Amino acid sequence: MAKPTTEQLAKINQLARVPLTEDETYTFQAKLVGDRVIPRRFYRITSNFLRKMADQAKQGVSLLLDHSWANLGIMTIPLGRTYDSRLQQEGDEYALYADHYMKLGQEINGIKIDQLADGIDAGTIFDTSIGFITTKHTCSICKEGYFSGRCEHFRGKVYEGVTCIVEMDDGELMENSLVFDGAYPGAGVVGLNNTDNSQLTTQWEQLSEDTKSLNGDERVFYSFSSKSGLVGFVPKQQQQNQMAEKLAGGDGNNVDGKENQVQAQQLQQATTALNKANGLLEQIRTALGVTADAEILTKLATLSGQAQVGEQFKTSLIDETCGSGVRALGDAFNVDAMKLSLAGLPVTEIQKVRDTYEAQAKAVLGGGGRHTQGENLDLPEGALGGAAPANPQATGAEQTPEQLQAKASEDAREALRRTGNASIMKEAK
């Protein structure tokens, strides 16, 4: 049976009321969960929630059989407890592992601990499944609370090539159970306590409060809980350094040793580059609102199509705006300079410029409406006496079309001067 190391036993006895010995303690490691989408359920635990779970697993959560707390009428008594945890980046998955311990020689609610330990060692007991509470559910598409009433999407449905996923971003880890068929792929017992199965993965360790320098890419991940407060985690370099020393071999005074040192350095560089690439992929997935690498290209293709439509609309709007400017200012309007100026503005600002020129053009051209009132064909007063006919529409403030055009041109020039765009005007002839 898997006995704890001295370091592991020390951690276990920080939780035990009565100190346990090596011979009466059984320990095993299990993968609890990761940040991949849970198949058929379309839920995903975020890396932020995973870091909080890792902190709670170190404090110790119960080990049960088949989520017995969820079955009414069945007494729930823990068979063991977690005492340590670690987070690992494995390709495109960010995963949580935890160490568990049970006391040998006990029989709890008809279950013999020694028999469970034998089953784990034999590989017949292997799947695990976590029990947890979630308090924050975010739609992967609109980023609104999925159950808030503001989200109009449904998990598992595809919208413009993107599947709606519920992002579980906060909550509490309650327990881990030994089960016959877990929901999360890969969750379960992964090896005995002394088995090194993660030499080339990134592990995380808690950031000390007095740390002033960091190795690698200087990333720090944080989790927050009511029990532990704000806790930072940084990539653990110890295993990488041990691998480098193992590859280096000897004291470096022989040819083989030097070659191994070079290989060790190359391995470290490759591992650092891989970690950075995985971190960048996570940022890209978050920015695009997708959960899997395979969805990135689909999302980019959709965005590219939308961008092309937007560019076509913007080009058409600029042409329309310049047309209004020519109608308003005539030869004073510099079309080429205005197109360059408008190209750097957002669509909403271009629309404002277009509306301004369009209003000026209507004033210059007389508004595009009729210049008579109704169908009254009576001659104006004084028409038969030889005097100049009166204008029944006159208000005393009327201007000729030429005067209106001159005034509109001057108003437009003044507006361009105020906004610092006087350079786009042609010189008055």
Image: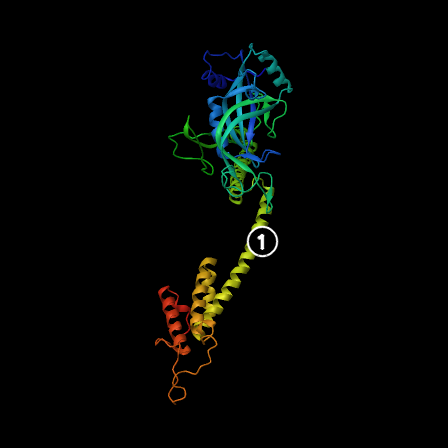
Task: Determine whether 277 is above or below 233 in the image.
Answer: below
The colouring scheme, among rainbow, by chain, secondary structure or one colour, is rainbow
- Seen from the viewer's position, the closer of residues 387 and 34 is 387
Lateral position of residue 383 relative to residue 168, left or right: left
- Say if 4 sits above or below 183 in the image: above
Residue 283 x %, y %? 51, 42
Q: How many marks?
A: 1
- Name the residue tied to disc 1: 305
* Residue 3 x/y as whole percent: 55, 15
Determine whether the residue tagged by mark 1 lies in a helix, strand or loop: helix
Rendering coords of residue 327 (x, y %) = 46, 72
- Could you say where residue 4 lies in the image, as x and y percent from the top left? 53, 17
Residue at the image position 40 percent from the left and 35 percent from the top: 213
Say few, some or many: other residues with alpha carbon within 10 Å of mark 1 (under 14 / 14 to 19 / 20 or more). few
Of the 4 image quadrants, the one containing the C terminus is: bottom left
Q: Nearer the viewer, residue 157 or 101?
A: 157
Is residue 120 among the parts visible in the rendering? yes
Name the image quarter holding the N terminus. Answer: top right
Q: Is residue 427 visible?
A: no
Q: Is residue 19 above or below residue 410?
A: above
The kind of residue tagged 1 is: Gly
Closer to the camera in the image, 408 or 20: 408
Q: Nearer the viewer, residue 160 or 399?
A: 399
